[in-house]
Image (spheres, rainbow, N blue to C red):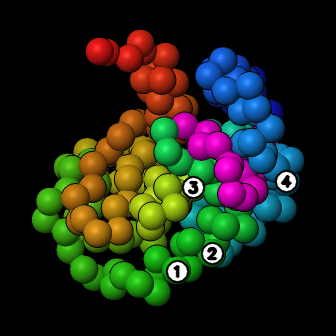
Amino acid sequence: MDNQAKLLWQRITEQGSSRKASFEETLHLQPGASDEDFQRLERILGIRLPEEMKDFYKVHNGQHWLAGTSAFVRNLTLSPIAQIVENWEFLQEEFDPDDLEPEIGEEIKPLLWNAKWIPIAENGGGDYLCLDTDPSEAGALGQVLYFWHDWGNRSVEAKNLYAFIEMCLEEEDEPDED
């Protein structure tokens, strides 16, 4: 297991706990994912998972969503592998893989939905944080993007999962401006 993944989880819980005493408890974290979980996900999605994702999920296989669950970063709940499969299947049914999206970052293939995107987190409103396992030539494997359900614009948020989490932790660490 990657030590960086453990350290990121530790930073997430420490930072959240500094703002809310019950933060770690209300994350509702699940035990780590197994190699079988990853193999099943790769088989269903027809992709190879980024190693960072595997390492991160080996620590905690997402969150069990209940009323009052705290977001792990921003307003996002980390989906367990079973939920990733459900969300991916839903998105596969909802969006035609041939639909093009012209307002898209150059690092992303110009598709409204790409079956090679892994919806790892959600905000509860139909928007997903995805890992891109099929980037354009200008992109990077495992780059992070938002899939907005009601807005076609897609852009890369970070070059990989760890960089995205680091960015979110730094945002939350900044003092509020008055």
Which residue type does callout 1 highlight?
A: Phe
Whether pointer 1 and pointer 3 mark residues with C-beta atoms closer than 8 Å, the reply is: no
Which residue type does callout 3 highlight?
A: Ile
Q: Secondary structure at mark 2?
A: helix
**Was residue 61 drawn as part of the magenta stretch in this picture?**
yes
Whether pointer 2 and pointer 1 mark residues with C-beta atoms closer than 8 Å, the reply is: yes
Q: Determine the CA span between mark 1 and mark 4.
A: 24 Å
User: Mark 2, residues whose alpha carbon is within 10 Å: few (<14), some, or many (≥20)?
Assistant: few
Q: Earlier in the sequence, mark 1 or mark 4?
A: 4
Which residue type does callout 2 highlight?
A: Glu
Q: Determine the CA span between mark 1 and mark 3.
A: 13 Å
- Give x and y (percent) for residue 39: 75, 63
Q: Earlier in the sequence, mark 4 or mark 3?
A: 4
Q: Determine the CA span between mark 2 and mark 1.
A: 6 Å
Q: Is residue 157 left or right of residue 69?
A: left
Q: Which mark is residue 86?
A: 2
> Which residue range is magenta in the image?
57-73
Name the residue beneath numbered marker 1.
90
Q: Earlier in the sequence, mark 2 or mark 3?
A: 2
Q: Earlier in the sequence, mark 1 or mark 3?
A: 1
Q: Determine the CA span between mark 4 and mark 2.
A: 18 Å
Name the residue beneath numbered marker 3.
120
Q: Residue at x 64, y 43 (%)?
A: 70
Q: Secondary structure at mark 4?
A: loop
Q: Is residue 115 visible?
A: yes
- Give x and y (percent) for residue 44: 65, 75
